[in-house]
Amino acid sequence: MAVRRMRYLTPNASHERLGLYCLGAGYQEGVARPSRGRVLDCHAAVFVTAGRGQVRLGDQEVRDVVAPALFWLVPGVPHSYGPDSRGWAEHWVLFGGSATTGYEELGYIPRARPVAQVVDVVPLQQAFLGVAAACHRDGPRTDPVAKELLATSDLGVSSVARQVGYEDPTYFARIFGRKVGLSPTEFRSQQSLTG
């Protein structure tokens, strides 16, 4: 079952004079009905925060979407997209206005490369994500969050692994060791000696 929340807005003349205005925003989680052959009369940004699926824009080939990813929908171009059988979480915003042409010309709304890993196109701030962007690019989060959990909690390594996005604690320990230079257990022991 899918969870859906959405809101549609009608801008007034003051909003339209700003050159960029929101027409709607929403959130969907789970296995939603795929969007097939829809054509918008405005721009949309779709941010997939969990899961995976596919998108097809116009006559382009089908592209895989793996979270975290952002893709753009542009006016007048048919699109189809949706999650795989396990579902995904998506946030979307519809927007319009005269400024969108400028954003397209500057390459901020790329028609040729509409799907991108978020860390490739957006300079994410550590304060927003809680960890550095490189941790997102390199896979599930390990360094800051895992270190803090190991140093300040009594959680077992398996629980810490799950907290930072790993289902397999052995794989987590291997990646942690590669990045930090110590196993999770060695790191915890070291912190208890120095803390």
Image: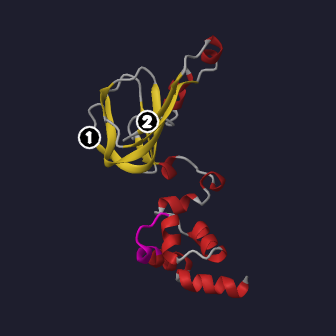
Residue under the point 63% across and 51% down: 128
Res 28 visible: yes
Q: Earlier in the sequence, mark 2 or mark 1?
A: 1
- Residue 67 horizontal/vertical position (percent): 43, 51
Using the rendered image of the protein, determine whether residue 105 is visible from the camera's viewpoint. no
Where in the figure is residue 72, as x and y percent of width and height? Answer: 43, 35
- Which of the two residues, 155 or 113, is positioned nearer the viewer here? 155
Amino acid residing under circle 2: Trp
Residue of label 2: 72
* Vertical arrangement, residue 12 with respect to residue 102, above or below: above
| Callout 1 secondary element | loop
Q: What residue type is labelled 1?
A: Glu
Kindly give the residue lying farthest to the right in the view shown: 195
* Residue indicated by mark 1: 61
Of 6 and 186, the residue lying toward us = 6
The location of residue 18, given as percent across then percent down, is 64, 20
Whole-percent x, y for residue 114 in the image: 40, 39
Quarter of the figure with residue 36: top left
* Whether residue 35 is situated above or below residue 48 in the rendered picture: above
Residue placed at 61% from the left, 13% from the top? Answer: 12
Distance between the Cα atoms at labels 2 and 1? 15 Å
